[in-house]
Amino acid sequence: MRNTAKFLLKLVFLLTLALPWLNHHLHKANASSNDTDRIALLKFREAMAMDPYGVFESWNRSIHVCNWLGVTCSRRHQRVTSLFLTGRKLVGHLSPYIGNLSFLVSINLENNSLSGEIPATIGNLFRLQELNFANNTITGGIPRSLTNCTQLRALNLSTNNIAGKIPVDIDSLMQLEVFRINSNNITGEIPASMGNLSFLNYFAARFNNLEGNIPCELGRSNRLSIVGLTYNLLSGILPPSFLNLSAITIMTISYNRLYGSLPGSFGSTLPNLQVFANSGNNFSGPIPSSLSNASQLYAVSFSYNNFVGSVPNLARSQALWALDVQGNNLGNNSANDLEFLTPLANCSNLVKLYVQKNNFGGSFPESAANLSAKLNQFYAGDNHITGLIPQGLENLVSLSALDLSNNLFTGEIPSNLGMFPNLQILYLGRNELSGTIPSSIGNLTQLFELNISYNNLTGTIPSSITSITRLNSFDASQNRLSGNIAPEILRMSSLSKILDLSGNLLSGPLHSDVGQLRGLGTIRISDNNLTGEIPRAIGDCRSLEFLYLQGNSFQGNIPPTLASLKGLQRLDLSRNNLTGGIPPSLQAIPFLQYFNISFNPLEGEVPTQGVFANASAVSFSASNKLCGGIPEFHLPNCSKAKTNKGKISYKLKLTVIIVCVLAVLLSASGILILYMMRRSKSKNKPTTVSDTLKHLLKVSYQDLYKATEGFSSENLVGSGSFGFVYKGILDELGRKIAVKVLNLQQKGVSKSLLAECNVLRNVQHRNLVSVLTYCSSLDYKGHEFKALVFEFMPNGSLERWLHKNVDNNSGSHQYHVATSLSLSQRLNIAIDVAQLYIISMI
Ligand SMILES: *[C@@H]1O[C@H](CO)[C@@H](O)[C@H](O)[C@H]1NC(C)=O
Ligand SMILES: *[C@@H]1O[C@H](CO)[C@@H](O)[C@H](O)[C@H]1NC(C)=O
Ligand SMILES: *[C@@H]1O[C@H](CO)[C@@H](O)[C@H](O)[C@H]1NC(C)=O
Ligand SMILES: *[C@@H]1O[C@H](CO)[C@@H](O)[C@H](O)[C@H]1NC(C)=O
Ligand SMILES: *[C@@H]1O[C@H](CO)[C@@H](O)[C@H](O)[C@H]1NC(C)=O
Ligand SMILES: *[C@@H]1O[C@H](CO)[C@@H](O)[C@H](O)[C@H]1NC(C)=O
Ligand SMILES: *[C@@H]1O[C@H](CO)[C@@H](O)[C@H](O)[C@H]1NC(C)=O
Ligand SMILES: *[C@@H]1O[C@H](CO)[C@@H](O)[C@H](O)[C@H]1NC(C)=O
Ligand SMILES: *[C@@H]1O[C@H](CO)[C@@H](O)[C@H](O)[C@H]1NC(C)=O
Ligand SMILES: *[C@@H]1O[C@H](CO)[C@@H](O)[C@H](O)[C@H]1NC(C)=O
Ligand SMILES: *[C@@H]1O[C@H](CO)[C@@H](O)[C@H](O)[C@H]1NC(C)=O
Ligand SMILES: *[C@@H]1O[C@H](CO)[C@@H](O)[C@H](O)[C@H]1NC(C)=O
């Protein structure tokens, strides 16, 4: 037996040695045709419009073809066997002459900017084993002729703009091991013939528009180890044969339209499974308990389906790093629902645990304290969990995010909650917590988001909260907190997203230190028992977009300084005791869409411009003594009688006449000047917002995708409710840019794009940088995509823009460094989430 095997091996070896010799003789006639290669390569070069790195400098007559940069030849024939030019920023298209490089075995042009179609002559390269055009901007389809390259082992066309279908005769590529077409616009079905590719090991087609079923024939590719189909339009059930592919290590099928239930044998038939991403489909039934047999599991997601029942025992999956079952119907709202946490204590590498948005009831088992000390994110919100928040959680020293919101937790906030040295996000809102806010909360110095709203908390807001120097969002609304709003809280310059203390029993005046909240977007202190005047300093809160002061006992006048809040969108002053008139300056707030001053004893004239021009944007109900305004308000006319009171002296009459004459002269000349300015302006200067936008260079999604290296986490420099900010280099402009990608799930973002352009144009906001251009198009998934492109100024105004809190006075260098550190830490969570996402994307 052994000897036979040895003999066979020798034979194969000898044959391998003999092959080049055979080749040589078969192609003797062509042996001197190395000129063909030279011509073909020169044509290849000719089709390149840009070569910024000077790759082709060596491609000249005085140098032998085989010594040209990126070219490798066979030793014997001096024929080109490999062309390797990756990441050279080449711009151009692919010459059909490429098909004349008939000895080519490998061509790799990854990470360039090649456009146009793949020439059909590629099919002449019958020796080709590796073809990698990934990360270009190639269009057209996968050429039919490619199926003539029967030696092909690795085909990578990922991240291009390739459309059309996977060729049905793809199975001509009998040797194919790697087939990657991620991030294109490939449509149609996965051809059943792919099941004939018996060497296929890696099939990645995420981010396309593939539709139809996953063919059961794919179950014949029994070497298939990695399959990525995330983000397509695949439907139907998972064929059993597909789930019998025991070689599978990574299977990602998230965000399709798949349904059905997973077979009971699921974990047993996929014993090598490491990553299983099945989010955002329509699966139902239980998560098979056989999953416990997949002992290699590393990351597993069943989120956003309709799974029911319990979470299997995963104690054997020692390597488990992430478990995500959020957004299902798991649990029965009963006492033992959370028992699955107990065996998870064995998974000492568990870092991410997402069980939120299910039907889990009962209380936390004590064993929750034994979860991995590496646990970094624990989301359990939106369930029906009862009982106390266990003290033992303090063992989870690595936690950076803890979400227990929207459950039925009772008792007090445990005072040892201050023991999490790394906690950045703490959500305890919408429970039945009572007692006071423990002062130890100030120990959570890394915290940047704190939500304890909708509980039954009493007492004052502890002043220790000001030790949380990174807090950017604080929501303690709808509790029974009392006492004053301490001025120190209003001096927390890190607050940038929201300060919500509404619906409490807070009393006393609003201190003028509120003006220190220069970076804050939303202040909501409505429905308390606040008194005194609204401080004029509120006009210093330059970043405010939403200001809610209704339902208090504020008195005095509406401060005219509110007009300084150029970004203000909603302003509610209703149900107070405000007197005096409406300051006419409020007409100048450009994007105010909602202004409520009902139930205040205001008087005087209602202006007619700005927000006051829109009857549905302003509420006055039950405010008495107001007059004027646009007719839709149906307010009484303001009587002009006041000015005519008494007799006018001769002197005054004279002054009036002189002033009138001067005014007429001035306005006449003014009109003339304006007219002349308009004339010169209208020639080259844009006048409206849309004109401004048209005027700017328009960039495409693809441009920005390239510029930010696919919106990579390395380039992520900031995030917020608006979306994300990436840095990048926009080739056409050659400039460093910051791309602010707007989160379109957020309501009203389309409007805010225009609004922002407008603000940027109209307002010299000290924290904003100049906008270069904008992008409004469709992303690779065909979803709406909007982004603003700013000039990127490292450590400059962009940084400041991201940390609106950096004050000029304290803007020492160290302070800057400190804030950027905190930024990167803040981003940890976002990036970690992205990591899981990336894993599910392979
Ligand atoms: C063509 O090949 C011959 C030997 O086969 C070699 O001497 C000659 O330099 C080659 N010419 C070019 C242009 O590569
Ligand atoms: C050919 O390329 C080499 C290497 O870049 C360069 O040194 C040489 O000057 C070039 N010759 C010509 C004729 O351009
Ligand atoms: C090479 O390819 C081109 C275009 O595909 C073709 O026109 C030409 O005849 C081919 N042969 C040689 C020897 O260049
Ligand atoms: C695409 O190529 C560019 C260079 O052209 C590179 O910077 C970028 O990281 C690449 N993107 C991916 C996803 O490989
Ligand atoms: C392409 O760019 C990406 C991102 O910069 C890099 O990870 C990858 O190694 C590059 N590919 C090649 C073949 O150089
Ligand atoms: C594949 O090659 C054969 C023979 O070389 C040719 O007849 C056929 O047209 C080619 N197929 C395609 C799709 O180019
Ligand atoms: C393309 O596939 C090759 C393997 O064939 C791999 O090395 C490379 O990283 C892949 N590139 C992309 C962008 O998928
Ligand atoms: C936490 O805060 C409490 C009260 O504010 C304090 O006494 C204690 O020393 C702090 N613990 C740590 C570990 O900082
Ligand atoms: C809040 O606490 C009060 C008294 O402590 C109690 O009467 C009330 O029911 C509680 N409310 C909730 C929602 O738990
Ligand atoms: C509001 O404050 C006043 C006096 O400051 C007090 O009389 C009143 O009871 C308070 N209202 C509530 C609801 O606490
Ligand atoms: C409203 O303010 C006036 C003084 O400006 C005061 O006399 C009156 O009591 C206040 N009304 C309420 C309900 O607080
Ligand atoms: C993808 O292809 C579909 C159908 O051919 C087309 O409607 C859509 O615009 C394409 N999307 C992109 C981003 O090219």
Image: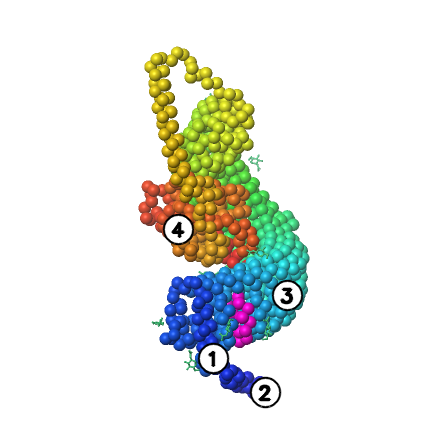
Q: Given contact means CB atoms under 8 Å apart, are the residues at marks 2 and 3 in contact?
A: no
Residue 106 vertical position relative to residue 211 in the rendered view, above or below: below
Q: Given contact means CB atoms under 8 Å apart, are the residues at marks 4 and 2 in contact?
A: no
Of mark 2 and mark 3, the one earlier in the sequence is: 2
Q: Give SS at disc 3.
A: loop
Position of the C terminus, as image quadrant, is bottom right
Residue lying at 40% horizontally and 76% vertically, measured from the top left: 64
Q: Is residue 123 magenta?
A: yes
Of mark 4 and mark 3, the one earlier in the sequence is: 3
**Some atom of ligand 3 lies within 8 Å of the CB belonging to the residue at label 1:** yes
As drawn, is 632 to the left or to the right of 35? right
Magenta-colored span? 118-132
**Some atom of ligand 6 lies within 8 Å of the CB belonging to the residue at label 3:** no
Q: Which residue is mark 1?
A: 33
Q: Is residue 251 magenta?
A: no
Position of the N terminus, as image quadrant, is bottom right
Q: Which residue is mark 3?
A: 191
Q: Residues within 10 Å of mark 4 (few under 14, many from 20)?
A: many
Q: Which residue is mark 4?
A: 792
Q: Residues within 10 Å of mark 3 (few under 14, many from 20)?
A: many
Mark whose residue sits in front, 3 or 1 = 1
* Residue 742 visible from this viewpoint: yes
**Looking at the picture, which amino acid does disc 1 mark?**
Ser
**Some atom of ligand 7 lies within 8 Å of the CB belonging to the residue at label 2:** no
Of mark 3 and mark 1, the one earlier in the sequence is: 1
Q: Which mark is residue 4?
A: 2
**Looking at the picture, which amino acid does disc 3 mark?**
Pro
- x and y, in percent, of residue 55 in the image: 40, 67
